[in-house]
Image (tube, rainbow, N blue to C red):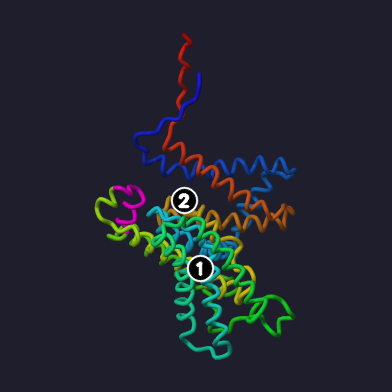
Amino acid sequence: MRLRLEARTETARWLVVATPLLAAALTLASGIVMFAALGYDPAKALTSFFIKPIENVYGLTELAVKATPLLLCALGLAVGFRGGVWNIGAEGQLTMGAVAAGGLALAFHGEEPGWLMPAMVLAGALGGAAWAAIPAFLRARFNTNEILTSLMLTYVAVQFLGYLVHGPWRNPQGFNFPQSRDFGEAAIIPLLMEGTRLHLGVILAGLAVFAAWLLLDRSHLGFQIRVSGSAPRAAAYAGYPVSRIVWAGFLAGGAMAGLAGMMEAAGPIGKLQPLISPGYGFAAIIVAFLGRLNAFGILLASLLVALLYLGGETAQIDLKVPPAVTGVFQGLLLFFLLGSDFLTRYRVKLVRRAAAS
């Protein structure tokens, strides 16, 4: 007897919906085993990780704040992923969006013009899109592997930000810390609820969900993107231009990631510092696939992954667990999601070995 993988002729729709739930359940089960192996009470650890962070209004607002950059980045990535464009550089595009918006805020520091905030929103989106245009051009013009170019440019962006806050943009009154001046009041996103960090960007992110849904599921360009990703030969036969899909995927992803970077810099942080994101651009890849590249699915997935960030911080305080636990949960979630997806396309079959003659 031996095991053989057999491709499914078609995938049941309920399997597509059920596999993210299965991946989340398996991640939770693995977390129980992991905490027990580390010597922690699993019930107490999971309560600290998944319940305590959102047991009050402040915790729920923090969940929304952390979900916002994940949601924006994942929505942008989903546009490219649906078209077979593998933009892995959302982290760098987020960073460059923060640089572009932050540079504008610092340029008008102390002047407080009323148009500054809308200009920063535009600058953040354009900064991220411009950074994404580099791998888009290389892919469209030279057929360069966009996974490598977009990923490598992330480290260039982070180093560029580091140069700025250690050098020309460092706060002269900042006691030599590598950070810029605090943004002025006109360059800070307005709060929605006093006593919390909940800001207007959360509402803008919610509007972006509907915009992404309209683009991907209700527009002709979205139809071309879906066909190009699922059936490249059919797209070529229909005459859909590959370069347009590549540019659309990268520019949408870069603009949304840049907007997320702007909201981080002008929201919870309020200045530029060496690291704007704890890895939102990379975690957004998990969010996009966990949400099945669907705008509303991504909204739910972003809340789950944001809870992992919040839970990791709470567990570090309450249980003194290592900071890497958050990354372990994200890795487990991706591992089980990929495994579940594989089984939706293939079935495991037990076959008898042929008798020896």
**Circle 2 residues within 10 Å: few <14, some 14–19, many ≥20:** many
The residue type indicated by label 2 comes to Phe
Q: In this view, does 288 lie to the left or right of 248?
A: right
Residue 86 screen position, x and y as percent: 45, 55
Type of amino acid under label 1:
Ala
SS label for mark 1:
helix
Kindly identify the residue that appears in the image at 43 percent across and 31 percent down: 347
Label drawn at residue 289? 2
Q: Can residue 231 be seen in this view?
A: yes
Residue under the point 65% across and 55% down: 312
Q: Position of residue 231 (x, y in %)?
A: 32, 47
Q: Give the range drawn in magenta.
A: 222-233
Is 227 part of what is drawn in magenta? yes
The crowd level at tag 1 (other Cα within 10 Å; few <14, some 14-19, many 20+) is many
Residue of label 1: 260
- Residue 107 sits in quarter: bottom right
Whether residue 335 is situated above or below residue 327 in the rendered picture? above
State which quadrant residue 308 falls in.
bottom right
Query: Which badge, 2 or 1, comes first in the chain's sequence?
Result: 1
